[in-house]
Amino acid sequence: MTAIENEKPDHVPLAFMIFTALKRRLKLKYNKYDPQELVTAQLELGTDAMVDLRTFAPENKKIGHADAPGFPVHFNEKVSSHEWAEVSGGNINPVLHKKYETPAGDLSVVVNQTYDWPYGNAAQGKFHVPFMDDYLAPRSRKYLISDESDIEALKFLLDPPTAKEIKECHVAWNSGKKLAEKHDLLVAGGWGVGGDALAWFCGLENAVYMALEKPELLKSILDVVHEWNISRMKVYLEYGIDLFIRRAWYEGTDFWSPDLFLEFFAPNIKQEVKLAHEAGTKYGYILTSGSAPLHNILTDLGIDVLMGVDPVQGRGTELESIKRDLKEEICLWGGVNGFITIETGNRESIEKAVYEALDTLGPDGCILSPVDNVRDPSDQVWENVLIFINTWKKYYNL
């Protein structure tokens, strides 16, 4: 919290934004996944782990919302859905169809089942098309939303959390909160979604065209998502967390101009920040590329933490310039690339990256992390993870 408040802690914290490699190693070791064990294992490594409550709540596997975690997602009780597969047009792989039938009309999505599709195989008679998932974005032949007539139907798919779901989440979260209290750890919640939902519901290229040709349609989609997002966010804030996190990987200037960002995203973000601050909660914003032209806007919106400062794969995230732009305004979380530097790098490149991040972003308003994840659970990559952590320890004589 000292770092998030842009003050100088006794050392720059090291807290992984996401740590899939450790999760997978623990699952291989214990043949199950325990979110408490994930936190405990990070503490044993000597890092400043956070308790991310979104990892404690179960996903509704039937619906599929791996990229909008935090609560089980459910549809309105009047919604039914059907899936089927077909091979046509000379395609080697099946084409997957899903139709959602709602009182306001039907919505449908058509997806290519590529070789790396993680949700079953239609050729074997078992497959699934998720509702909110990044696998949809590059594989969809037809997206869920294409015109204004689809908006009312979308509302039936974005039902707010029920009292039963909230109660179940509280039970699941309580174990995480107790762990945080025991070890004096940051408690985070989320992920909120906004523009990222455009990748799943209508495709990013289509969304950019909408901004120029059908701006009212784009606003309508974002307003429906925003209302749903707020209903979930309020549950976290009422429960009590230190940091609320919004996933905004697809809200940067790799896709949107600053003017379009101001028009379509800033108003909803401003309301979220206001709600968080009224609850005494900090607001984190995950944007790993294309942030530079938005720095003044993000500051004006009152964002507390910019998560995902990536000096290698990000655009507009050079460490010196981002620290200069946001010093004493927004805490910077990241500093080292997760894939190229940690997963495929060597001792020399990892040590150099850690020192550069700490020297440039620290000592105040900075939290060190690979951006935005380390996924590979192999022993070779794990050696690199340990080099990363031990270099940070050596820097501070920990």
Image (spheres, rainbow, N blue to C red):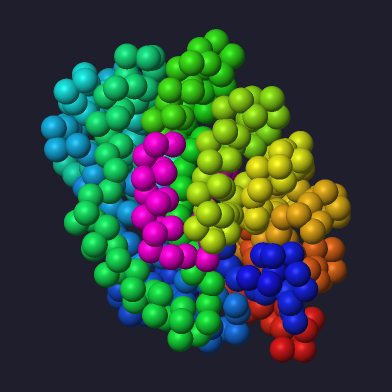
Identify which residue, 128 or 310, lies in the foreground. Answer: 310
Identify which residue, 283 or 18, lies in the foreground. Answer: 283
Numbered marks: total? 0
Query: Which residue is at a point 61% across and 25% down the rendered structure image?
Result: 263
In the rendered image, the quadrant that contains the C terminus is: bottom right
One can see residue 384 in this view: no
- Where is residue 325? Give x, y as percent: 83, 49
Q: Is residue 12 left or right of residue 72?
A: right
In the rendered image, the quadrant that contains the N terminus is: bottom right
Query: Which residue is at a point 54% across and 72% down the rendered structure image?
Result: 186
Whether residue 234 appears in magenta in the rendering, the answer is yes
Identify which residue, 47 or 193, lies in the foreground. Answer: 193
Figure quadrant of residue 125 = top left
Q: Is residue 393 left or right of residue 178?
A: right
Query: Which residue is at a point 50% across and 58% down the rendered structure image?
Result: 279
Whether residue 274 appears in magenta in the rendering, the answer is no
Q: Is residue 208 left or right of residue 118?
A: right
- Where is residue 278? Give x, y as percent: 53, 54
Q: Which residues are magenta?
A: 226-249
Most extreme residue toward the bottom is 397
Q: Is residue 94 left or right of residue 294?
A: left
